[in-house]
C-alpha cells in the first residue's frame, strides 16, 4: 500500500511527463489527448493548449486550458469535446502513473465540472475547464471543507477571553 506522499509524487511525476514534445519509450511523440498533438509540429499552425493538476486534500483537480476558434465554440457539441479532453487527461494520468510507480491509480469524479470561455478577439476564444476527482488510497488526510477541531490551548484561550469586549 502506497503512502499519501508516494501517491502525490507519482501523480505529479505523471503530469510532469506530459510536457510538449515529450517522447515515449519507443521515441514516438507522447499522446495525452490534447489538440496540440494533432498535425505536423512544424508545418501546421500550433495549437496552444495544456493542463495542470492541483491537490486539495484527497481530491485531484485537473485543469485544462486552450485556445479555440469561435467556429468551434458555436458548435452543438463543444462542451462534450472539452469534457472528453479532461477525461482523456485523467486516463493518461492513470496510465502514466502505472508506468512511473507500478501501482494503479483510482480516480472517481467528484461534483460537477466547470467550463469558462473568454473572448479574445472576433476569431478566437480562451477556454478553461476544471474537474475534481477523488483519489483512491488517500484516507489519512482531512476532507476538503471539513471543519477542523479546536486546537487552542486552554492558557491561550483564557488570555484571549481577558480582552473580549469588557
Image (spheres, rainbow, N blue to C red):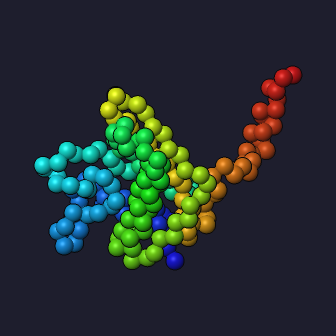
Residue 11 appears in the picture as rendered: no
The structure residue drawn at horizontal position 87% and vertical position 22%, both measured from the top left corner, is 166
- Horizontal relation, residue 147 to residue 92: left or right: right
Q: Position of residue 41 (x, y in %)?
A: 17, 52
User: Residue 95's quadrant in the figure?
Assistant: bottom left
User: Residue 119's quadrant in the figure?
Assistant: top left
**Outermost residue to the top:** 166
State whether residue 146 is above or below residue 91.
above
The structure residue drawn at horizontal position 34% and vertical position 28%, both measured from the top left corner, is 121
**Outermost residue to the front:** 76
Q: Position of residue 165 (x, y in %)?
A: 84, 23
Q: Position of residue 141 (x, y in %)?
A: 60, 60
Residue 145 appears in the picture as rendered: yes
Q: Position of residue 31 (x, y in %)?
A: 29, 63
Which of 33 and 59 lies nearest the eye of the viewer?
Answer: 33
The structure residue drawn at horizontal position 21% and vertical position 63%, both measured from the top left corner, is 29
**Outermost residue to the right:** 166
- Horizontal relation, residue 119 to residue 132: left or right: left
The structure residue drawn at horizontal position 73% and vertical position 45%, both measured from the top left corner, is 152
Amino acid at each position: 500500500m502506497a503512502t499519501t506522499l508516494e501517491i502525490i509524487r507519482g501523480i505529479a511525476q505523471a503530469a510532469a511527463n506530459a510536457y510538449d514534445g515529450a517522447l515515449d519509450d519507443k521515441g514516438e511523440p507522447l499522446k495525452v489527448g490534447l489538440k496540440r498533438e494533432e498535425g505536423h509540429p512544424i508545418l501546421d499552425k500550433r495549437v496552444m493548449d495544456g493542463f495542470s493538476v492541483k491537490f486539495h486534500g484527497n481530491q485531484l483537480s485537473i485543469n485544462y486550458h486552450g485556445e479555440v476558434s469561435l467556429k468551434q465554440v458555436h458548435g452543438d457539441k463543444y462542451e462534450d469535446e472539452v469534457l472528453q479532453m479532461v477525461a482523456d487527461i485523467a486516463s493518461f494520468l492513470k496510465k502514466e502513473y502505472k508506468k512511473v510507480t507500478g501501482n494503479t491509480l483510482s480516480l472517481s469524479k467528484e461534483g460537477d465540472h466547470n467550463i469558462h470561455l473568454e473572448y479574445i478577439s472576433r476569431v478566437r476564444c480562451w477556454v478553461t475547464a476544471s474537474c475534481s476527482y477523488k483519489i483512491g488510497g488517500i484516507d489519512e488526510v482531512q476532507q476538503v471543507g471539513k471543519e477542523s477541531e479546536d486546537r487552542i490551548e486552554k492558557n491561550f484561550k483564557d488570555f484571549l477571553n481577558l480582552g473580549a469586549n469588557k
